[in-house]
Amino acid sequence: MTGIDLANGIVGAVLGIIFATLFQQPLQNAWFRIRRRSATTVRSLTYREDSSALSTWSTFSIGPLHTSALVVEGDGEQPIAPETIRIQVLDGEVVLPEEMAPWRAEIEAVEEQAETSGTRVRTWNGPRYAVEGLEISRTTLEERPDIRLRLRPTDYFTFLAAQQLDRRLPDGTTPRGRYLDPDHPLDAPAFLQCSFGVNVAVVTADHLLVVSRRADNVRSGPGLWGSSVNEGLSRHIDSAGRNAPDLHDVARRGMREELSLEPHEYTLTMLAFVLDVERRQWSAHFTAHLTDLTGDALRSRISRGVADRWEHQSIEYVPFRPANVVRYLLRPDRVRRWAPVAPALFHLALVHTHGRSAVERAEVQAVRRLRQ
């Protein structure tokens, strides 16, 4: 090697060190920003507009217990904080397709006839909300959900008309067949999703799960066993002025109206967003742990009167341990008598308190005993 070659080599090495020092960190920072943006994009999923990734999702089941409840967000272990939820109420009421509009007119005529004839009390056509879309994304570092729920005004008669998913249209098709794709369960027009409610699993201070049976005369799920508290969103009650509803406040209203419980008497935690894909009804799942009231104290309070007693015809109390609750869910006289979203609610509430491993172990053991 000549002196010139050696000098050139030294100069090249020095320049390489200078280049690395000056530009390596900016390049790394730029690459990190690109990866971070990409990760955020991959994690973001707009459920109403692109749910192709959900075609393999299954509805909730435990052994012989099969439901139509699809757990869209939430696993029970990580609570959903109120500040992660943004609710937007869109302008313009839901409009039924031309071929379904007569069904709503039929319902209205029947209710008017009932009032005129005096055969029964007329059903009130209360203002409700339809689900236009649910969008969920996550921050890259904290993995916290960012949830945007878009609602549109509707009413109870439109809900009843849209619940006739298997009624024949003039061309022989059904709303279920024409507007819904079973491989993409979250893609649905708002007029078929005119229901959003909250379901609460209530646990007493002495660790008893409150399970209620719906009255036989209610329109939705008559006679079925379900959550401790079930409350639908009401535009009239839950949206003061032009404000969007607050799901935690709706749950508190349900606790007050159905069990006569006040907010200072329990801790309330949101666990999940769930869709009943068979009936196109959305739900926010909560659990509420009573701080002082035992099962006997709650029974005594209910015996003195609750605002919405007519909605439930009986209440049972189950030890809030995984094995007890799972055996209760799978009882032969009960396994086909559950409201669709209730088993998922109780599973998530168990996971929140006892941990996923303990709950899944109890479920596996219970199913194994049934098969022996």
Image: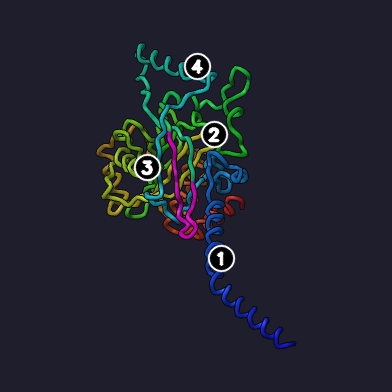
Q: How far is mark 3 from mark 2, CA to CA?
A: 22 Å
User: Does the image show residue 308?
Assistant: no
The quadrant holding residue 30 is bottom right
Q: Are marks 3 and 2 in contact (CB under 8 Å)?
A: no
Nearest to N terminus: mark 3 or mark 4: 4
Instruction: Name the element at disc 3.
Output: helix
Q: How far is mark 1 from mark 2, CA to CA?
A: 44 Å
**Magenta segment boundaries in residue numbering:** 136-151
Taking the magenta stretch, the answer to whether it contains residue 142 is: yes
Which residue is label 4 attached to? 102
Please name the residue shown 29% across and 35% down the image: 240
Nearest to N terminus: mark 1 or mark 2: 1
Which residue is label 3 attached to? 247
Please give the label number shown on residue 188: 2
Q: Amino acid at mark 3?
A: Leu
Instruction: Name the element at disc 4.
Output: helix
Q: Amino acid at mark 4?
A: Pro
Nearest to N terminus: mark 4 or mark 1: 1
Quadrant showing the N terminus? bottom right
Please give the label number shown on residue 68: none
Looking at the picture, tell me which residue is in the foreground, 372 or 121. 121
The residue mark sitting in front, 1 or 2, is 1
Nearest to N terminus: mark 3 or mark 2: 2
Taking the magenta stretch, the answer to whether it contains residue 25 is: no
The residue mark sitting in front, 2 or 4, is 2
Q: Amino acid at mark 1?
A: Leu
Nearest to N terminus: mark 2 or mark 4: 4
